[in-house]
């Protein structure tokens, strides 16, 4: 019997679940834990997922996270940024991005804090958020759930949420938001965020206190499912032998 | 056959105050840093720079970008400081919109219809952005991404010949061909100039992404992308990049500008 799962491992499995049933599309995880999740999904219940090395190559077998640039890999395809942009229009992609802020309708901000004209804190820039969210499914990963991240209103809309969906979106789906405290989705009548599950050891009150807007739950909130022994083995021995996940999620 | 070999100094002599310059590469990868260094030594100012931004967006009037990042250092501190102090103007768009703006310029049309941007704050902070309704399907309303014509494009390749053909040996050529085609004039630095007959010795036909119609000058600049990466010739110089990111520009610049 493997030792019980850490919070980071629970999060990795919760991220993997985001890609369940996605079939033969590119999984684009941003961040260590989402990357572990995508590779775990491909090794278990979503074997048709297309993975990359985080750069321009499609890899036939999942690489360990943190693998050096010259680590051996089986290359099955080529996806430089120009091709990735084409693929995004085509819709065969599900990205899990970070979010410096996310609001109750799933609007995401990675651009700036404060007014855009003269930000209090300039961040990355919108990057691909606007295009991702109107072209293919998008999920978000938040390793530090707090009221400063889960805000009433984002300062800048990079990724488009459910209250701003343009009529000409090809698709619009914010699949899930996974945080270090739980899993959240938009399966409510008005597509506002709700708690889908809380991670083992986390209470609903704790999640609510760490969130700046009210989070409904449909009935009793279940616990996020625990990793199986095989999933733990894959995470610890195959996908993340250096335990990089522990630098992203404590405890 | 024209010999397009030139120097960083001669390239910079082509630039004028207030021009719009496109810079190839991506983040902190394969940026034409030796030309940028020469540019910073010159009196040319008030440039608008269009870029998948890395450490190439200092000393400007305006930046057109989708993001600015040093990759291994996710947020570019000097860019942040410039934006937060209001020292520079900005046009912030989705990275796919930036591609479309360059493509429109390369295709010599005034705009291309684009889905990215709809519903996001990009539409609010760029009041000049308009939408367009499909003449074939009235329910389809898309962003009319304006062309981003460039006065000059600056790119860095792994290999080139004296005629101005360019070769990429790394995994991604980014959008360097589009930058050149969107520009009135384009200059390419490279790690090494080789005989045209030798171009295919190091890579397949598909690595010849830049043809000589796209370029007006070629600068042989070994290490010319440093401290950004130039795969497979060299990796990013993380130590120098860290110094750049953590040192006030006034202190870093004199030292960096003296490097050849």
Image (cartoon, coloured by chain):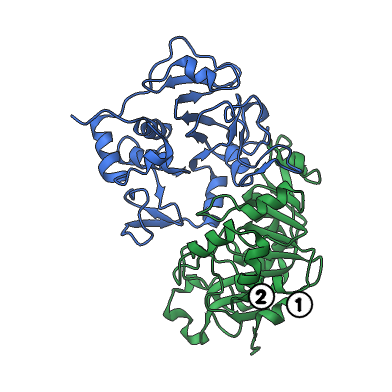
Chain colours: A blue, B green
**A11, B250: nearer the viewer:** B250
What is the quadrant of the N terminus of chain A in the image?
A: top left
Q: Residue at x 33, y 49 (%)?
A: A64
Q: Relative to residue A250, is residue B128 drawn left or right?
A: right
Residue B173: x %, y % from top left: 53, 65
Identity of the residue drawn at 34% across and 33% down = A9
Q: Is residue A203 above or below residue B247?
A: above
Crowd class of label 2 (few under 14; some 14 to 19; many from 20; radius 10 Å): many
Q: Which residue is mark 2?
A: B187
Task: State the image coordinates of residue A81 (x, y, percent, origin top left).
Answer: 53, 55
Q: Nearer the viewer, residue A64 or B81?
A: B81
Q: Are marks 2 and 1 in contact (CB under 8 Å)?
A: yes
Query: As drawn, which residue projects farthest toward the left?
Result: A1
Say above or below: B221 vs A84.
Answer: below
Residue B14 image label: 1
The quarter holding residue B258 reads bottom right
- Percent across and percent down for residue A128 are 59, 45
Q: Could you tell me which chain the residue with mark 2 belongs to?
A: B
Can you tell which of label 2 and label 1 is closer to the viewer? 1
- Residue B234: image quadrant is bottom left
Position of residue B46 relative to residue A158, above or below, is below
Which label number is shown at residue B228? Answer: none
Quadrant location, the C terminus of chain A: top left
Pointer 2 or 1: first along the chain: 1
Labels in figure, total: 2
- What residue is rendered at 69% in x and 59% in y? B50
């Amino acid at each position: 019997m493997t030792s019980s799962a850490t919070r980071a491992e629970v999060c990795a499995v919760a991220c993997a679940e985001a890609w369940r049933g996605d079939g033969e599309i590119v999984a684009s995880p941003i961040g260590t834990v989402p990357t572990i999740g995508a590779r775990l999904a491909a090794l278990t219940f979503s074997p048709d997922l297309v993975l990359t090395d985080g750069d321009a190559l499609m890899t036939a077998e999942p690489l360990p996270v943190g693998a050096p640039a010259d680590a051996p890999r089986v290359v099955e395809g080529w996806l430089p940024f120009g091709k990735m942009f084409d693929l995004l229009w085509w819709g065969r992609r599900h990205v899990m991005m970070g979010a410096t802020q996310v609001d109750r309708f799933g609007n995401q901000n990675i651009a700036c804090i404060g007014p855009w004209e003269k930000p209090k804190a300039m961040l990355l820039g919108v990057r691909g958020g606007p295009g991702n969210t109107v072209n293919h499914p998008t999920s978000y990963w938040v390793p530090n759930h707090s009221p400063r991240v889960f805000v009433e209103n984002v300062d800048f809309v990079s990724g488009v949420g459910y209250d701003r969906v343009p009529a000409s979106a090809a698709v619009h789906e914010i699949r899930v938001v996974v945080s270090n405290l739980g899993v959240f989705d938009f399966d409510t009548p008005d597509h506002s965020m709700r708690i889908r599950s809380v991670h083992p050891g986390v209470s609903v009150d704790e999640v609510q206190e760490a969130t700046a807007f009210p989070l409904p739950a449909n009935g009793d909130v279940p616990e996020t499912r625990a990793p199986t022994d095989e999933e733990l083995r894959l995470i610890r021995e195959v996908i993340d032998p250096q335990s990089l996940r522990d630098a992203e999620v404590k405890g | 056959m024209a010999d397009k070999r030139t120097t960083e100094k001669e390239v910079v002599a082509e630039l004028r105050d207030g021009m719009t310059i496109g810079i190839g590469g991506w983040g902190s990868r394969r940026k034409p840093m030796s030309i940028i260094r020469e540019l910073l030594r010159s009196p040319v100012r008030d440039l608008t720079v269009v870029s998948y931004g890395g450490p190439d967006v200092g000393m400007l009037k305006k930046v057109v970008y989708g993001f600015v990042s040093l990759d291994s250092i996710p947020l570019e501190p000097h860019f942040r400081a410039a934006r937060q102090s209001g020292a520079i103007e900005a046009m912030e768009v989705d990275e796919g919109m930036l591609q479309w703006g360059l493509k429109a310029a390369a295709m010599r049309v005034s705009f291309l219809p684009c889905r990215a941007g709809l519903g996001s704050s990009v539409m609010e902070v760029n009041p000049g952005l308009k939408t367009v309704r499909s003449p074939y399907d009235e329910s389809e309303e898309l962003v009319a991404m304006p062309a981003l014509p460039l006065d000059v494009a600056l790119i860095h390749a792994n290999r080139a010949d004296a005629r101005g053909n360019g070769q990429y040996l790394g995994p991604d050529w980014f959008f360097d061909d589009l930058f050149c085609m969107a520009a009135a004039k384009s200059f390419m630095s490279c790690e090494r100039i080789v005989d045209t007959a030798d171009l295919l010795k190091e890579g397949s036909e598909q690595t010849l992404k830049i043809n000589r119609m796209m370029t007006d000058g070629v600068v042989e600049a070994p290490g010319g992308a440093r401290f950004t990466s130039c795969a497979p010739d060299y990796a990013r110089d993380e130590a120098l990049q860290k110094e750049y990111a953590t040192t006030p520009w006034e202190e870093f610049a004199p030292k960096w500008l003296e490097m050849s």
